[in-house]
Image (spheres, rainbow, N blue to C red):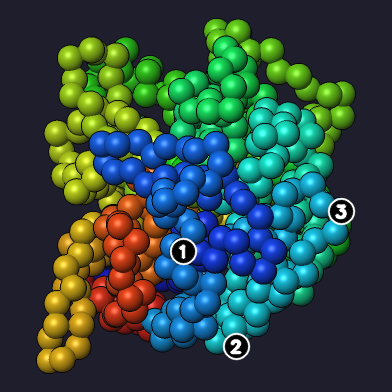
Amino acid sequence: MSEYKFPKGFLWGGATAANQLEGAYNVNGKGLSTDDLLLGGSVDTPRKITRTEEEGAFYPSHEAIDHYHRYKEDIKLFAEMGFKVYRFSIAWTRIFPTGLEDEPNEEGLKFYDNLIAELKKYNIEPLVTISHYESPIRLTKEFNGWESRKMIDQYVKFARTIINRYHNDVKYWLTFNEINILARSMGAYLAGGMYVGDSNVFNNTEVNTDQMIFQALHHQFVASAIVTKYAHELDSSLKMGCMLAYRMIYPLSSNPKDVAYAQKMTQMNNFYCGDVQVKGYYPYFAKRYWDEHNIKLDVLPDDNEILKEGTVDFYTFSYYQSTTVTTSKDAKVSKGNFFNGVQNPYLKKSDWGWEIDPEGLRTALNQIYERYEVPLMVVENGLGAQDKLVEENGVKTVNDDYRIDYLQGHVKAMAGAIYDGVDLKGYTSWAPIDLVSASTGEMRKRYGYIYVDKHDDGSGTLDRYKKKSFYWYQRLIKDNSLGD
Ligand code: BGP
């Protein structure tokens, strides 16, 4: 291909999550979320959870980048880049501060009224993630989060409230961010608000982690399906999507054992959740997994019907890297976004050890489309890197050619997949503006086209500066194609 063209109307934009950028964690009636009790960490030090807010402790989400008070300035910058779509999440605890209230918090709803109005002003299509890695901490304490079926009602109440309020302006909805991450240990806290294993800070009871996690996932599937069906009945113009952390998995060698292992991992990490949400039923290999792990799912008589009636309209996913696996014990471990594989000799790594693999995105897009044949969107992709703010002709900027290289490679891969015939509707890179890292809580792991003067110790003016990649993305959106 000499040119990398995108279809007319392709949705270019960016993606964020409330707890990673809004700040204002206790403002205008907002309650404490699971993320508000997470301390910062680093690439080698896992983030810790505290039981209550500890005096003097630094919680990255509390101020984050103060988007709550600066959303107009930020959206103006997104509009300047030419965004067609903006993916953001609604903080559950702004709307239902403890999760248990009968009536929503009007001030919380007003914040999103204003944010959505601001997007509309610039003709930017909102894409809302209903639950992105946080839930009211009160629900964790009461129910241990999604371990309990009672979470379904709480989630449905929250989701209906925001869908009722915004459906005239918001046509695209994702029920859960990276739903498959719930099956990872830290993911259980982030995505489910549950305490498992070492993270169990509220009590020290022994838990069957597999049993608990897969039961929790079942509850999320049911909740997602109920809300999807509800949205379709309320307004047939609404498009409901699933969202997974897609894991493109390669066998390290052609040893048939490695190939079989890679297939098994692909099934459980990608297709287990995708099949339930797109096809409406558990895949054939689920039973084998449950039996092998002594999992006995508590499925109510109506659940299977609910799953069938609540299938999604489109499939979205995050893609940062690929994962290589082997059955050999000698291979060197490699770091990743919640998944560790082994080092792939053909790939380079980011500063945080995530292997960079644009070609894998084209393969992933084909793999997903071949299985589901529904419209796709890449709703997260980007490079977390350390940036250096410099001054050129009196203007502060970052010369982030490394980020442009990364993004360009992935944009070419998407063009390739479209050329292959994949129905890809849009791309929201993570994240258009620097914000708090989910896995490490750091600010210095930066993804943005916009630099934010905020640092890991909490210092900084919070001023925004355009990086070189800002202009690169602006050009790409304007041309809707990438030159050679
Ligand atoms: C995904 C999450 C995002 C985001 C991204 C980058 O898993 O959905 O919330 O943070 O990863 O990861 P990190 O922030 O850990 O670098």
Of tags 1 and 2, the one toward the viewer is: 1
Q: The residue under label 2 is which amino acid type?
A: Lys
Q: The residue under label 1 is which amino acid type?
A: Glu
Of tags 1 and 3, the one toward the viewer is: 1
**Residue at the (74%, 55%) spot, across then down:** 96
**CB within 8 Å, label 2 to label 3:** no
Q: Which residue is mark 3?
A: 102
| 39 shown above or below 263 | below
**Residue at the (65%, 80%) spot, across then down:** 114
Counting from the top left corner in percent of width and height, residue 17 is at 51, 59
Q: Nearer the viewer, residue 253 or 45?
A: 45
Q: Which residue is mark 2?
A: 121
Q: Nearer the viewer, residue 146 or 367?
A: 146
Q: Nearer the viewer, residue 302 or 368?
A: 302
Secondary structure at badge 2 equals: helix
Residue 412: give its label: none
Q: Find the distance from the CA under tag 1 to the CA under tag 2.
A: 26 Å
Q: The residue under label 3 is which amino acid type?
A: Asp
Secondary structure at badge 3 equals: loop
Tag count in the figure? Answer: 3
**Residue at the (59%, 83%) spot, across then down:** 118
Locate residue 274: give its quadrant.
Answer: top right
Q: Is residue 368 visible?
A: no
Q: Nearer the viewer, residue 472 or 161?
A: 161
Q: Find the distance from the CA under tag 1 to the CA under tag 3.
A: 28 Å
Query: What is the quadrant of the N terminus in the image?
Result: bottom left
Counting from the top left corner in percent of width and height, residue 451 is at 30, 72
Q: Which residue is mark 1?
A: 63
| 458 shown above or below 335 | below
**CB within 8 Å, label 1 to label 3:** no
Packing grade of label 3 (10 A; few <14, some 14-19, many >=20) is few
Left or right placement of residue 166 versus residue 415 in this view? right
